[in-house]
Image (tube, rainbow, N blue to C red):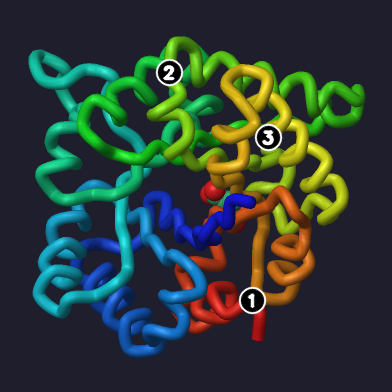
Amino acid sequence: MTTRTPLMAGNWKMNLNHLEAIAHVQKLAFALSDKDYDAVEVAVLPPFTDLRAVQTLVEGDKLRIKYGAQDLSQHDSGAYTGEISGAMLAKLKCTYVVIGHSERRQYHGEDDALVNAKVKAAFRHGLTPILCVGEELHVREAGEHVAHTLSQVEGGLKDIPAEQAETLVIAYEPVWAIGTGKVCGADDAQEVCSGIRGKIAELYSQDVADKVRIQYGGSVKSGNVAEIMARPDIDGALVGGASLDADEFVKIVRYRE
Ligand code: PEP
């Protein structure tokens, strides 16, 4: 039986400049101990402009906290003004990169083909994608949420080999629960996360499916995280708003206590 280390990742979105980032990571580092890091992997996902400052702090103080970016270009270099490549993120020793967040899909028109190209770019540079999937409210109301989410998983993973797929993190984030305070019930989240694991087994094998970590995201807070984490196919949380409060994020990391 595969044991999957839970991943608690804070998606800061477009918040905290590089000075605020240093203060925030210092607060987390002060609060978290080896006991926390032994139980749960902890990651922060700051804006691009903070990454160098976070890297310097993490390396200088030998922190066990991981970090990554919120997006990357599908291209490796060249005339793509405003873009950031996987090579640049790898040079900053990022572990993770969020791909296909619903805010990118919604405001930047990212579709499954582009998301798939970005997943490939991440793997080319040794980064671990946190592939975000999830339905909008009208899709859930129509009862199509599982099919919709699984089709995003399939689209995002097109032509990704099993050796890469097994290292992946998938974040199930129902769009209607992001930043709204509306949490998807733990049983509803489990329904979709178990469907995602089943889809990975179908696309690859049960062995790969058992290794992939599946997070839930959408208004996760210290008050609801334990119930969500109790579900068998949920291996962590992608936390937006609540990750900007260091004390609250530490409580989320310590969901077992
Ligand atoms: C997110 O941005 O991925 C997210 C889940 O946000 P929030 O926790 O604020 O709903």
Q: Residue at x 69, y 32 (%)?
A: 196
Task: Kindly identify which residue carries mark 2.
Answer: 160
Mark 1 closeness class: few <14, some 14–19, many ≥20 residues within 10 Å: some
Mark 2 closeness class: few <14, some 14–19, many ≥20 residues within 10 Å: some
Task: Kindly identify which residue carries mark 3.
Answer: 197
Rounded to the nearest angstrom, the CA distance separating label 3 from label 2 is: 16 Å
Task: Kindly identify which residue carries mark 1.
Answer: 255
Secondary structure of residue under mark 3: helix
Q: Is residue 25 left or right of residue 162?
A: left
Q: Please indicate, yes or no, whether residue 179 appears anywhere in the rendered image.
A: no
Mark 3 closeness class: few <14, some 14–19, many ≥20 residues within 10 Å: many
Q: Residue at x 65, y 31 (%)?
A: 206
Secondary structure of residue under mark 2: loop
Q: In this view of the protein, which residue sits in the foreground, 30 or 257?
A: 257
Q: Which quadrant holds the C terminus?
A: bottom right
Badge count: 3
Label of residue 88 in the image? none
Kindly identify the amino acid type of the residue bearing the numbered disc 2: Ile
Please report whichever mark, 3 or 1, sits nearer to the chain's N-terminal start: 3
Kindly identify the amino acid type of the residue bearing the numbered disc 1: Tyr
Q: Is residue 35 left or right of residue 208?
A: left
**Against 200, is 217 above or below?**
below
Residue 153's x, y, as percent? 60, 23
Please report whichever mark, 1 or 2, sits nearer to the chain's N-terminal start: 2
